[in-house]
Amino acid sequence: MEPAGNKLTIPLAIVFAGALIAGGIFFSRESGGEAAAASAAAAHSPEAVRSLFDSGDDGALSKPTDMPREIAIRTLDETDRVRGNPDAAIVIVEYSDTECPFCKRFHTTLQQLIAEYGKAGTVAWAYRYFPLASLHPKAPHEAEALECSRALGGTTAFWKYADRLFEITPANNGLETAELPNIAEYAGLDRAKFIACLASGAHRALIEKEYNEAAAAGGSGTPFSVFLLKNAPQKSSWSNILALFERYRDPNTGTLPIAISPDGLRISLSGALPYQAVKATVDALLK
């Protein structure tokens, strides 16, 4: 069964054809990024990574002139699944695919980040759907399962379901469909009601809407994340932030995995960047 797959496959073909024409599909970049991340982790301690942001400049933010790009996604609303304080200084909106191996890894990264910053209410995490059906045909159906968990049990059940799904999936379309009701029971949901919800297709339109949002905002692969900021940074230097991401520059296309909106209030990150890189970015933005 491939719910939402037919609707999503056509725009996916357009997105990925464009990526190929540009000279390198996102997932080729991701495999190189993984090697770069491992090399960076070996060469730089957490303190060294964070030191990239400590410019000692207490003046106003100086934005680079070659990076700004519109990052048009909606702000949080009642349809969002938020972990942490929705009014946080930084809300990380993650567009994710449950069968993407990089999303599986990045899910753990964001869990760790929320464990560190969530209690203080400074960072929150919003999960949105970006199932790449042409690569992972099971992902749209799993996105529906996630949304059924929220419809039946609220945000708490959603996150319990999501954590368990990412924990047990082998990724790359490897999760058995029969596991979805089992995860629902694990999350405390009524199995029969969950199965009925999943069969109804009631949430396909919402999943397709979020997929299209991610594509329109510049997402060409998963995970694709956007930091929504309450205030543009004043004590952090954009040049230092970009210096951190130089080590993750795509060797094939020469592009960075980061983009910044003209007003400095939105930052997009492409790929499963390692925890220390994400933490260092958060620390810089909170200054």
Image (cartoon, rainbow, N blue to C red):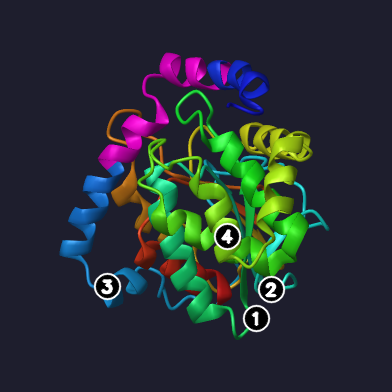
Q: Nearer the viewer, residue 4 or 255?
A: 4
Circle nearer the viewer, 1 or 4: 4
Note whether 116 is above or below 93 in the view shown: below
Circle nearer the viewer, 2 or 4: 4
How far separated are the C-alphas under marks 1 and 4?
A: 23 Å
Which percent across, then down, holds residue 99?
45, 41
Residue tagged by mark 4? 161
| Residue 92 within the magenta-colored segment of the rendering | no
Q: How crowded is mark 2: few (under 14 residues within 10 Å), some or many (20 or more)?
A: some
**Residue found at x 21% / y 55%:** 38
Q: Are marks 2 and 1 in contact (CB under 8 Å)?
A: yes
Note whether 42 is above or below 15 in the view shown: below
| Magenta range | 14-32
Residue tagged by mark 3? 48
Identified by mark 3, the residue type is: Ala
Q: Which of 210 and 256 is in front in this view?
A: 210
How far separated are the C-alphas under marks 2 and 1?
A: 6 Å
Circle nearer the viewer, 4 or 3: 4
Main secondary structure type of the part rendered in magenta = helix
Q: Earlier in the sequence, mark 2 or mark 1?
A: 2
Residue 201: quarter of image: top right
Identified by mark 4, the residue type is: Tyr
Direction right: furthest residue: 78
Residue tagged by mark 2? 88
**Residue found at x 46% / y 58%:** 107
Identified by mark 2, the residue type is: Ala
| Residue 26 within the magenta-colored segment of the rendering | yes
Q: In the image, 178: left or right of 244?
A: right
Q: Which of marks 2 and 4 is nearer the N terminus?
A: 2
- Label for residue 121? 1
